[in-house]
Image (tube, helix red, strand yellow):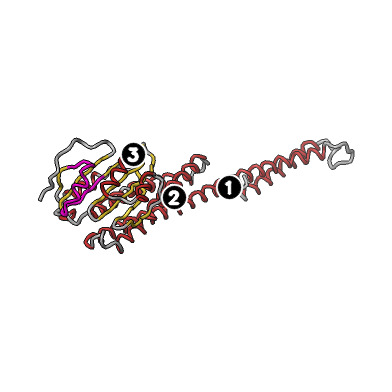
């Protein structure tokens, strides 16, 4: 069976993909946004739309074509939403945080997902890789894509979580490099700054991944009219991956806290060592200062003051006292 839909011109830049699929998982001709409602009239097809940074006009058009709820569309207008899942009638609205490397730095974005019985709409904001690889993988497995929009949702969410894994590995590699600097004998302010920046990014990663566990848990257990029973094991697999990412980020966060504490402790110990050495040298310098100040006073009756060898005796005694003190300080590692 095929839809009576004509080929159209390439979609505008905000519309990345707008494709209809037959109930057997095969791809039908690409459609325009205006033709979505026509495509949905066929009971044997569902529509998968992907948009990026849409304006209000495009979202209003999608709302009209899919009969989306006003509150969900209002949230999709703004990119600063917390990860969540909400039910609006016979549809779900899901907000997920995404992450990717941009110019060597981690950037976070959002994806808003509308899931209905016969449609899936993904709205990307900020830093987020294209979901074309997820779509291509689905199209290579039409038997699984025939499950419907719930399997397409699995592919998108699996792609999002899998993109966290390279970031975790990069964080682990950076942490290993910073551990070397932590135990370096020379204090570097840049080390503390790098530790803080890494911990901040780990907190952002945890804020992106932790709520996803609750979302996936709901998809595994609830919404039977939207999530087919056949696809629930796949969501459990994503849940395991999300747990791995969260546990890895929690572990690294604890290690970073320990590394910062160790670094500050080593700085304190190093400062203590410097103070000990300064105190030791000050003690050695204090010996001749004290002795010469005694013998520099205007008293006539001082020991050995009038003897012919007084100067040499005084100098020798001073040297012996200094040498003895030096040996004691050296033994207790103050010098």
Of residues 329 and 77, the one drawn nearer to the viewer in this rendering: 77
Query: Do callouts 3 and 1 mark residues in contact (Cβ within 8 Å)?
Result: no
Query: Cα distance, mark 3 to mark 1?
Result: 55 Å
- Assign a secondary structure to mark 3: loop
Q: Which residue is mark 1?
A: 268
Categorize mark 2 by other alpha carbons within 10 Å: few (<14), some (14-19), many (20+).
Answer: some
Give the magenta range: 30-49
Q: Where's residue 173, x and y in %?
A: 38, 46
15 shown above or below 251:
above
Residue 142 in view of the camera: no
Query: Which disc number belongs to residue 216?
Result: none
Q: Which residue is mark 2?
A: 203
Q: Is residue 131 left or right of residue 180?
A: left
Q: Is residue 296 left or right of residue 258?
A: right
Q: Which residue is mark 3?
A: 55
Q: Report the mark closest to the observer, 2 or 3.
A: 3
Q: Report the mark closest to the observer, 3 or 1.
A: 3
Q: Where's residue 277, x and y in %?
A: 63, 43
């Amino acid at each position: 069976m095929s839809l009576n839909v004509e080929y159209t011109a390439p979609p505008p830049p905000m519309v990345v993909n707008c494709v209809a699929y037959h109930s057997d998982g095969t791809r039908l001709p690409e459609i325009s946004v205006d033709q979505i409602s026509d495509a949905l009239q066929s009971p044997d097809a569902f529509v998968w739309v992907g948009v990026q940074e849409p304006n209000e006009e495009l979202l209003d058009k999608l709302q009209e074509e899919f009969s989306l709820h006003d509150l969900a569309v209002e949230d999709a207008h703004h990119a600063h939403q917390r990860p969540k899942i909400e039910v609006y009638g016979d549809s779900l609205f899901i907000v997920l945080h995404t992450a990717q490397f941009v110019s060597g730095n981690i950037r976070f974005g959002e994806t808003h997902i509308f899931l209905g019985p016969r449609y899936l709409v993904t709205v990307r904001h900020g830093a987020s890789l294209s979901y074309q690889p997820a779509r291509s993988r689905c199209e290579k497995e039409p038997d699984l894509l025939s499950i419907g929009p719930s399997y397409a949702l699995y592919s998108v969410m699996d792609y999002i979580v899998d993109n966290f894994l390279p970031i975790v590995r990069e964080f682990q590699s950076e942490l290993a490099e910073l551990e070397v600097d932590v135990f370096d004998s020379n204090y570097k302010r840049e080390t503390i700054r790098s530790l803080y920046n890494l911990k901040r990014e780990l907190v952002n990663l945890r804020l992106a991944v932790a709520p996803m566990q609750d979302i996936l848990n709901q998809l595994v257990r609830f919404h039977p009219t939207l999530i087919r029973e056949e696809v629930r094991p796949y969501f459990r697999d994503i849940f395991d991956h999300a747990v791995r990412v969260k546990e890895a980020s929690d572990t690294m966060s604890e290690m970073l806290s320990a590394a910062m504490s160790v670094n500050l402790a080593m700085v304190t110990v190093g400062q203590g060592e410097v103070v000990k050495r300064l105190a030791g040298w000050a003690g050695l310098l204090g010996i001749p200062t004290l002795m010469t100040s005694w013998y520099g006073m205007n008293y006539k009756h001082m020991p050995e003051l009038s003897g012919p060898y007084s100067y040499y005796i005084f100098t020798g005694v001073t040297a012996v006292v200094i040498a003895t003190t030096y040996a004691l300080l050296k033994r207790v590692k103050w010098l």
